[in-house]
Image (cartoon, rainbow, N blue to C red):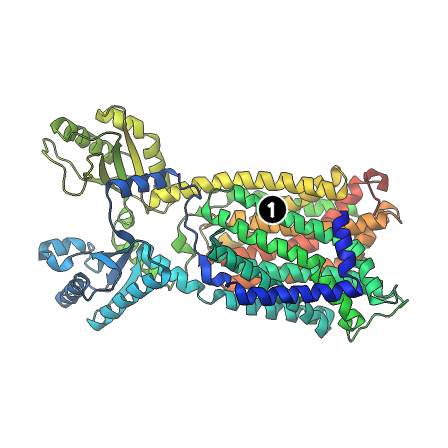
């Protein structure tokens, strides 16, 4: 182990050092709680954009703002629906609402609304759905509003809808970007507190059930609480000083990770501490010896997790990138606590920590043969059979990974009864699918456009060419031959841009719609050429579908890059720790096989048992980062103990002893880690439910099958003699 860390853990395990360490941690927590804000005060919601803001759709939006400036921010879509046809009374009430939205009494941050009350009956009729059961009514809010201001404006609209009597037998929902934003905030309101209480309660129950010691159960939670106090305030300082974005989703998942990992580290420490208390008279000597063996695995496991989190900085998709600083800060503090706070607290508690089962010096270690002792013997006897059977099972799961289907519709992740989702589904049922989110096409010129008859003819040809493309339902303005001017609002005041609006045939969030926009982008130059436009003119595509196409491409890019970089870097880290070439390859190989098998089996369950057509495109990345990084913890703990035993026993026996001695603590840690991630299944977002389910299943598979059976079997088969290990000195 690196000497500075060796000196550090030796100091924190001593009588004086333990007291100073605990005092220092408590002082830091107190100072930060007084002078630093909480992360909750500065949490943000990452957009589904690029951190560089240079995707084609984002560039199109920038041109749109420059050429067609407006004070509009988020748009809310008000959806009115009656099971039967709308009545004249309904029309009168909607007209009354429309007048209010245009008056001085309207919500403070409302910029504009559909002037329904100014339209003739004929035009009003055209706004209803074909079956006359549904009306779409759009309003725009100011740009740059915070969540509270958005919620306040939408709440006032809802109150007014009730006051005019539109809630009498009629459904009213608010969807669109503003509605989705408001619902997202309401879904996560107080989520961190619920997650923390659920996680703490679950960990305490599991620890009590496994170790039957109240002190052992409560101590890791106290440690986690202290560490959380530090991490929360550091993130608060970062948000206040704008060092980096404090993503709310990242903070929620970080909370689960923090309690789970610190509990794991506590298990690793006090399990070895209990062994050493039977050999040493003083509690500080016992802790010093325990940390001599445990600190290196903790250091390298924490280092690999940190390395995995740091790789998120190479991503361009904003939600992935914004996870990097939050988790990196948390992992650094967690790792430091694992090497200082955990050993110092347990060293001071000494034997009392294990009450009522207090270990005594030279206490007989003979006990009834446990599950992992029996399993280790089976692995030693039949490594080829057990390893082969598990390999086939895992490959079947991994093969199913290739059939996964992804959804790019955020609303699919919302609960079915939430307003923004219900409103969107009503619109989808009663209006042409593409009208839910039209695509804006911008014809942009480097120089000022001369809008003469020749130019209008080119625009007319371009409009027709766009209309003829596969997947396009209609284009506006729908130019007519010999037109003498463009319709109002389609020509920029600078005379450098013209905008078109495209209605697609498909739902704007379906893969078919994304493919249509991709084809339009690819054929942009040909369309301009056919229309007679010279160089210096470009087509740009903006809107929800164009944005989701960029999300899809960023996700594919980030997945490929992350999977490659994390695999290489963590393999190198394992090589540095084991001082071997074959060992880290085997360790990383089993982790990757475990990941792909977990994802494959998870998809089979989601598709065939839960009835999902697709899952969130983010799921593979999030599960990869956490499952791979955390899986290495148990790999390192197991292999470190095997290498320790290999110095005293033949290789096959060393592997068996390693499994028997670490099986209990690793399985306990795995159960706790799986249970804490399963807490995410209580959250209302489908994405978090699936993430929690997949992580829990993957960790259990990894803990009991990969770490307990498959990896030991592989190590026995690939290392016939302990000389095969390049370095077994421990």
Position of residue 150 in the picture relative to residue 163 (left or right) = right
- Residue appearing at x 25%, y 63% in the figure: 108
Q: Residues within 10 Å of mark 1 (few under 14, many from 20)?
A: many
- Residue 499 versus residue 149: which sits nearer the camera? 149
The image quarter containing residue 282 is: bottom right
- Disc 1 designates what residue? 308
Q: Position of residue 552 (x, y in %)?
A: 43, 42
Q: Position of residue 224 (x, y in %)?
A: 63, 64
Label 1 residue SS: helix
Outermost residue to the bottom = 356
305 up-or-down from 23: above or below: above
- Residue appearing at x 49%, y 38% in the figure: 557
The image quarter containing residue 286 is: bottom right
Q: Position of residue 683 (x, y in %)?
A: 49, 63
Position of residue 152 in the picture relative to residue 568 (left or right) = left
- Residue appearing at x 51%, y 68% in the figure: 193
Residue 14, can we see it? yes
601 up-or-down from 256: above or below: above
Q: Position of residue 204 (x, y in %)?
A: 65, 70
The image quarter containing residue 26 is: bottom right
């Amino acid at each position: 182990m690196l000497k500075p860390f060796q000196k550090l853990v030796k100091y924190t395990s001593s009588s004086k050092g333990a007291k100073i360490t605990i005092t220092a941690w408590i002082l830091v927590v107190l100072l930060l709680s007084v002078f630093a804000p909480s992360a909750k005060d500065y949490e943000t919601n990452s957009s589904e954009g690029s951190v560089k803001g240079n995707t084609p759709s984002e560039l199109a939006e920038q041109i749109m703002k420059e050429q067609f400036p407006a004070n509009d921010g988020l748009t809310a879509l008000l959806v009115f629906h009656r099971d039967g046809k709308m009545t004249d009374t309904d029309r009168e009430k909607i007209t009354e609402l429309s007048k209010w939205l245009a008056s001085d009494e309207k919500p403070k941050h409302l910029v504009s609304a559909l002037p329904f009350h100014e339209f003739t009956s004929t035009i009003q009729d055209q706004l209803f759905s074909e079956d006359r059961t549904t009306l779409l009514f759009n309003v725009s809010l100011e740009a740059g509003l915070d969540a509270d201001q958005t919620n306040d404006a939408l709440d006032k609209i809802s109150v007014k809808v009730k006051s005019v009597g539109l809630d009498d037998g009629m459904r009213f929902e608010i969807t669109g970007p503003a509605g989705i934003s408001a619902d997202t905030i309401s879904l996560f309101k107080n989520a961190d507190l619920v997650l923390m209480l659920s996680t703490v309660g679950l960990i305490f129950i599991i620890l009590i059930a496994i170790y039957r010691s109240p002190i052992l159960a409560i101590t890791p939670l106290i440690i986690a609480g202290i560490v959380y106090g530090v991490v929360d305030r550091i993130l608060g300082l970062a948000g206040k000083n704008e060092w980096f974005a404090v993503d709310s989703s990242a903070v929620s998942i970080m909370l689960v990770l923090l309690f789970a990992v610190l509990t794991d580290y506590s298990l690793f420490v006090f399990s070895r501490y209990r062994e050493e208390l039977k050999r040493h008279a003083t509690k500080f000597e016992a802790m010093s010896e325990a940390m001599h063996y445990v600190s290196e695995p903790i250091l390298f496991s924490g280092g690999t997790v940190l390395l995995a989190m740091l790789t998120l900085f190479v991503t361009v998709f904003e939600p992935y990138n914004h996870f990097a600083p939050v988790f990196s800060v948390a992992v650094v503090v967690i790792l430091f606590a694992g090497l200082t706070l955990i050993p110092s607290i347990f060293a001071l508690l000494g034997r009392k920590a294990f009450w009522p089962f207090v270990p005594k010096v030279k206490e007989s270690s003979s006990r009834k043969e446990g599950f992992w002792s029996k399993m280790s013997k089976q692995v030693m006897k039949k490594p080829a059979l057990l390893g082969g059977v598990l390999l086939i099972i895992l490959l079947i799961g991994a093969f199913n990974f290739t059939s996964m289907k992804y959804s790019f519709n955020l609303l699919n992740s919302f609960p079915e009864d939430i307003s923004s989702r219900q409103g969107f589904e009503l619109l989808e049922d009663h209006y042409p699918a593409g009208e839910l989110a039209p695509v804006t096409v911008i014809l942009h010129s480097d120089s000022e456009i001369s809008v003469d008859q020749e130019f209008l003819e080119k625009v007319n040809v371009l409009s027709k060419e766009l209309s003829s493309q596969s997947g396009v339902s209609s284009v506006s303005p729908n130019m007519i031959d010999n037109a003498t001017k463009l319709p109002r609002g389609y020509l920029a005041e600078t005379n450098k841009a013209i905008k078109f609006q495209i209605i697609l045939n498909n739902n704007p969030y379906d893969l078919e719609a994304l493919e249509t926009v991709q084809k339009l982008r690819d054929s942009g130059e040909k369309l301009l050429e056919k229309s007679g436009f010279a160089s210096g003119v470009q087509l740009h595509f903006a809107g929800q579908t164009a944005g989701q196409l960029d999300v899809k491409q960023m996700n594919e890019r980030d997945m490929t890059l992350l999977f490659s970089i994390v695999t290489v870097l963590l393999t190198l880290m394992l090589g540095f720790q084991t001082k071997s070439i074959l060992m880290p390859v085997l360790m990383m190989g089993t982790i990757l096989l475990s990941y792909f098998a977990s994802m494959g089996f998870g998809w089979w369950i989601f598709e065939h048992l839960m009835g999902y057509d697709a899952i969130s495109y983010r799921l593979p990345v999030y599960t990869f980062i956490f499952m791979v990084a955390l899986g290495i913890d148990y790999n390192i703990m197991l292999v470190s103990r095997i290498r320790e035993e290999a110095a005293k026993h033949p290789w096959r026996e060393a592997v068996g002893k390693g499994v028997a001695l670490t099986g209990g603590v690793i399985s306990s840690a795995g159960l706790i880690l799986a249970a804490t991630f399963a807490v995410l299944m209580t959250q209302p977002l489908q994405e978090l439910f699936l993430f929690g389910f997949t992580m829990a299943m993957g960790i259990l598979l990894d803990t009991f099958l990969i770490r307990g059976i498959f990896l030991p079997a592989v190590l026995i088969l690939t290392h016939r003699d302990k000389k095969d290990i390049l370095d077994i000195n421990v």
